[in-house]
Image (cartoon, helix red, strand yellow):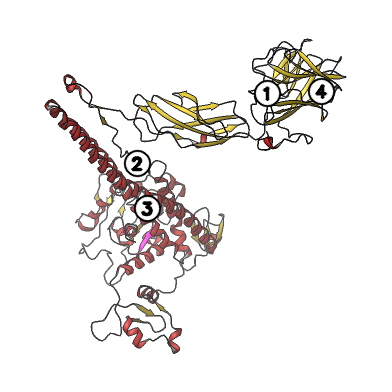
Amino acid sequence: MDEMEEELKCPVCGSFFREPIILPCSHNICLACARNILVQTPDAESPQSSRASGSDYDYLDLDKMSLYSEADSGYGSYGGFVSAPTTPCQKSPNGVRVFPPSVPHPPQAQHHLLPHTGVLPPVPRNSCLTCPQCHRSLTLDDRGLRGFPKNRVLEGVVDRYQQSKAAALKCQLCEKSPREATVMCEQCDVFYCDPCRLRCHPPRGPLAKHRLVPPAQGRISRRTSPRKISTCTEHELENLSMYCVQCKTPVCYQCLEDGKHSTHEVKALGAMWKLHKGQLSQALNVLSDRATEAKEFLVQLRNMVQHIQENGVEFEACLVAQCDALIEALNRRKAQLLSRVTKEHEHKLSVVRDQISHCTVKLRQTTGLMEYCLEVIKENDPSGFLQISDALIRRVHMTENQWGKGSLTPRMSSDFDLTLDSGPLLQTIHQLDFVQMKVPAAPILQLEECCTQTNSATLSWKQPPLSTIAVDGYILELDDGNGGQFREVYVGTEMICTVDGLHFNSAYKSRVKAYNSSGVGQYSKTLVMQTSEIAWFTFDPASAHPDIILSNDNLTVTCNSYDDRVVMGNTGFSRGVHYWEMTIDRYDNHPDPAFGIARADVMKDVMLGKDDKAWAMYVDNNRSWFMHNNSHTNRTDGGISKGATVGVLLDFTRGILLFLINDEQQGPVAFNTLEGMYYPAISLNRNVQVTLHSGLPIPDFYTPGESEAAASVC
C-alpha cells in the first residue's frame, strides 16, 4: 500500500487529494489548488479551443501530449500563487495575467473559502488553468471550476487509505486503559477486545448469529454511506445514465435530446462500467506479470552483486599470489595490475547497483499504480469509475511498455574475464599485462532457427549475450542418427549450418562448441532433430543429362533424344526401407526404359546399368531384364504399356533391390548385398514419358523379417 501513496497526492500541494476534480487531460487536482493556479488572459487572446467542461476538448489530443517526469512537471512554481504577495493583474513574461487570492490567508487556510459562505469565490472571466502534469492550458467557461467533474472514486480511495493508516481502534467496553480492539460486531456496532468479547459477547444464544468483522473493516462499514447518484455537469438536475462512446464521458438523457451528444453513439452506463473494469483488469494482469518479472530480476541483480564481490575477492587473491611469487621487479607492476582489477570491480558494481536503483524506482511506481487501480476497481460508482478508467488503462499500458524487451537484462557480467600470464621472462616484465587466456563459453543454440526438411537439418547458434571472450571458430557435431558416436560435420566461423544427406525417420543429436587460441570451450546443450518419416523426393535437374526434359515440379520426365539419358532423384538413401513408383504417361515405338538406383557418379549418356555405378531393370512391351555393369540377367515375361506402373523397393535391412510392374513382383530379387548411398534413377529416350510417385507405403505382399521390423520405414 505504501507504493500507492504517490498516486493519491496532489501534484500542486503535495498533500492527499481533497475534493479532487478531473481535468480534460485525465489528470487530477485539488479544487482549492485549481483555484490557486488560475490565471486570466486578455479578451483578445482568450483561446476558444479548450473549455473546462470538456465540451470542446479534442480527446485525440491525448495521443499528442508529451509525458514529463515529476521533476519536469513544473508544479513547484505554483507555490507562488499561495504564499507570495503578488500584485493583482501582474503581467508575467508569457503575456498572461496572474490573479492570486485577493486577501492573503494563513498557510492552513488552503481552500480560500469566502467568509461565512463556505463556497469558493467567483472565478475571473476568461480564466485559464494549466495542468501541472502535462502543461495543457484550458480556458474555463461560465461555470468556472464547477465545469470539471469531481473524482469521487479517487476521493474514496484516499479516504480508505487514510483510514488504513490511522491509529489502532480501542475496545469500547474496557473500564481502564482500553485494550486494542480485535473485532467489531456489526449488529451491536461495538468494538471488542478478546477478553471483553468473551465476557460480554459470548458466541451462544442470539449472539451466535451476530457477524464479527476485523476493526478496520468495521470502521469502514460504519462510515460508509449510500452511494451518491451522479448528476450531469451540464444539467445539474439530471442523473447520469448513459455513456457517450465518441466523447468518452457519462451523459444524461437531456444531453442526448438537446445537447451535443444527440448524434453520438451512446451505450448503457452499467454495461460500459463493466466493460472498462474488465479492460483495466486485463491490463493489470499483464502489468502484474511484468512486476513479478521485475522482482525476480532484482533478485538476480542482487545475487550478481554478491557474485561480483566473491569473484573480485577471489581474483585479487590469485593475482596477489602470482605477483608475490615473482622477483622484486614484478612488485612495481603488481600495484598497477591490482589497481586495474579494482577499477573493473568497482565499475561492475557501479553498473549493477545503478541498474538496481533504476529498476527499484520503476517497480515502486508500477506497484503503486497497480494498488491504486485495484482500489479503483473496488468502487461501485459507475460514472465515477468511467471518468478515470480510460486514463488508468492508458497509464497501465504505458507502464507495461516501460518494462519492454531489454529492461530486465543485466547490463554487466559478474565474471572477470582476465587471467594473469606469469610466463614472461624478467626482461619482459615491463610488458606484463592482462591477456585473454580463457576458452570461449558454450554457444547457445537458437531453437527458433533450427529446423529439419526431409533429410536435411539446419542449425543456428550464437555466443552468450555477456561473453566478451574472442572466438576463432566453431565445431558442429552430429551423431549417426541411431545413438552412435558424434562426428564433426562442420568447422568454421559461420554460426549457421545446413547438413544434407541424413537418414530419413532418424533422430539426430547435435551440439556445437567454440574455440580460440587458448583451446576449445564447452559444448552447447544437445539438440535432437527428427528427419522426415516419409522419403519425399523429386527428379534432380542439376544432375540430369542436358537432353532430359522435366515438368510438373520435377515429377514428370521425358527426353528430346532418341538415345537413352539418365536422371536421378534429389535424395539419396543409405538406411531403412524405401518404395517409390513411376507411371508410364507415354510409350511409343516399344522403347526399353530402365528403372533402378545409382551412385552419384553414374554415367548419364547411356542406359542405366551399363556401368558399375547403377543397378536397374530395363523393360519393353513384352519382357524385362536386370542389368548391372552391362551384365543382363533374369529375363522375365511381362512388359509395360501406357498407363502401367513400375515400382522400386529398396531394403537396406536385407541389402536387396526388387521391382514391381502393376503391383506384381517382376522376377526374383534383382540385387543383394547393397550398402552405401544410392539415388533413385531412370534412363529413357524421347518415346517415353513417366511421372514419379514417392513416399509410398511398402506393398502388402512384402513382409520384413525380424531384423527389418526394427528399421524405420520411409
**Residue lying farthest left?**
328
The stretch in magenta equals 9-25
Query: Which label lies toward us, 3 or 1?
Result: 1
| Position of residue 257 measured from the top left corner of the image (x, y, whole percent) | 56, 61
Q: Name the residue under label 4.
A: 585
Query: Which label lies toward us, 4 or 3?
Result: 4
Q: Mark 1 points at which residue?
A: 674
Residue 148 position by quadrant: bottom left
Residue at mark 3 to residue at mark 1: CA–CA distance: 70 Å
Q: Would residue 644 be found to the left or right of residue 516 on screen?
A: right
Q: Mark 3 points at which residue?
A: 366
**Residue lying farthest bottom?**
205
Query: Any magenta on residue 24?
Result: yes
Residue at mark 2 to residue at mark 1: CA–CA distance: 58 Å
Element under label 3? Answer: helix
Taking the spot 33% from the left edge, 69% from the top edge, the residue there is 163
Sequence-first tag of 2 and 3: 3
Q: Name the residue under label 2.
A: 410
The 10 Å Cα crowd at callout 3, few under 14, some 14 to 19, many 20 or more, is many
Q: Which amino acid does label 2 sit on?
A: Pro
Query: Which label lies toward us, 2 or 3?
Result: 2
Q: Which amino acid does label 4 sit on?
A: Asp
Residue at mark 2 to residue at mark 3: CA–CA distance: 20 Å
Residue at mark 4 to residue at mark 3: CA–CA distance: 72 Å
